[in-house]
Amino acid sequence: MSTVESRLAAAGLTLPEATTPLAAYVPAVLSGRYVYTSGQLPVVDGELIATGKVGVEIDPEQAAELAARCALNAIAAIKSVIGDLDKVVRVVKVVGFVASDPEFSGQPAVMNGASNLLLEAFGDAGRHARSAVGVAVLPRNAPVEVEVIVEVAD
Amino acid sequence: MSTVESRLAAAGLTLPEATTPLAAYVPAVLSGRYVYTSGQLPVVDGELIATGKVGVEIDPEQAAELAARCALNAIAAIKSVIGDLDKVVRVVKVVGFVASDPEFSGQPAVMNGASNLLLEAFGDAGRHARSAVGVAVLPRNAPVEVEVIVEVAD
Amino acid sequence: MSTVESRLAAAGLTLPEATTPLAAYVPAVLSGRYVYTSGQLPVVDGELIATGKVGVEIDPEQAAELAARCALNAIAAIKSVIGDLDKVVRVVKVVGFVASDPEFSGQPAVMNGASNLLLEAFGDAGRHARSAVGVAVLPRNAPVEVEVIVEVAD
């Protein structure tokens, strides 16, 4: 078990299998020393665990937990292309799209759910650049979508 | 003619010229082994071929065709900086922004129009990581905007 | 003083210090030959200099000035990880998120504020690929958010 997975286990988290999209795209791509993930939704066993807009049906605390689930799914997607997660030397960039009521502007706190999980999993290598934006609507009415770029060792 | 353009021709598609923006930005940038495109709109001969929000003025099937056009324009933008499209070794990442009614959550099906065109053009090298999000509005009221990162051979 | 900062000074602009987020993320990450910035808001001395949606509370001209401020903050974030801005050999990609009334579709003109500032700071190396989208809402009700990727010399 990788150190990353041990840390997640210590936090009570088990890495899922990456979900393979039924389409021309894939969960993640390894290119050179970088892995780019697809946008990850808060899915468990193929099902969204919540739907709706943050600020209306979903409150910010719940949204932060959903963002953490997106980040966990991103780690699973990364593992699907590199095998050993300890090859990750740096989480480079995270973009978080939060399906938001136009009056809700707390996207950073929502995305801290994802950022904190990445820090927990990768330690200092988990510190990343990040953008958080509030969008009109996400696929299947998901409240949050998170994409990640990581650098891996040669 | 590149293999990529031959495949597009077999599908009845002709690569346009890249549209040069009248501004400080360019259709695409080659940096190291990567090409980053600007966000591509469903433009033909400089004109948007449709406007409006998906789920209101534009239905999902039409939107998928528009996303395919965005992808074709992205390929043209890539060609403008590398010349020979057969230098592309992998389509790495695609982000699709779909101007969406807040009740429309079928962004993945819309973006399959772009993904399938990339697969048709590049074969297995066309399989990419992807994010699809629903945004409030796009430039010039375009229904779809697609940006692409590809890896090219040394 | 770097050439980049001299050019900004000639335009009457002083580079601020990068704002360190109070969270698991950082203003920018240097990875290999690339710097990725976090999404930058139009902040001066830690405070947003305007709030609201473009097309409602904020007009396009003001929004372009705010986008320029975001770009200046992005340059400060880049400096925080590379020290000497003259190491930048190319601005590769810019993404601009404009908090937009659903009827406002002038995101490109808004983002020209950011693009022009990058061109002023970096000269020809400042020409970049760009995406501009209109989103529902941004953190802290900011009107604009800009993220940047630059390539640096080995």
Image: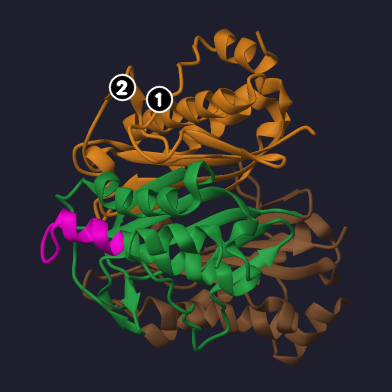
Chain colours: A orange, B green, C brown
Give above or below for B98 relative to C107.
above
* Disc 2 and disc 1 in contact, CB within 8 angstroms: yes
Q: Residue at x 33, y 32 (%)?
A: A22
| Quadrant of the image occupied by residue C152 | bottom right
Q: Is residue C115 left or right of residue C121?
A: left
Three-letter amino acid code of the residue under disc 1: Thr
- What residue is shown with label 2? A46
Magenta-drawn segment: B55-67
Q: Residue at x 72, y 40 (%)?
A: A33
In the picture, the disc for residue A19 is: 1
Q: Is residue B61 magenta?
A: yes
Q: Chain of mark 1?
A: A
> Visible in this render: residue C43?
no
The answer to whether residue C133 is above or below residue B105 is: below
Total numbered badges shown on the rendered structure = 2
What's under tag 2, amino acid-wise? Gly
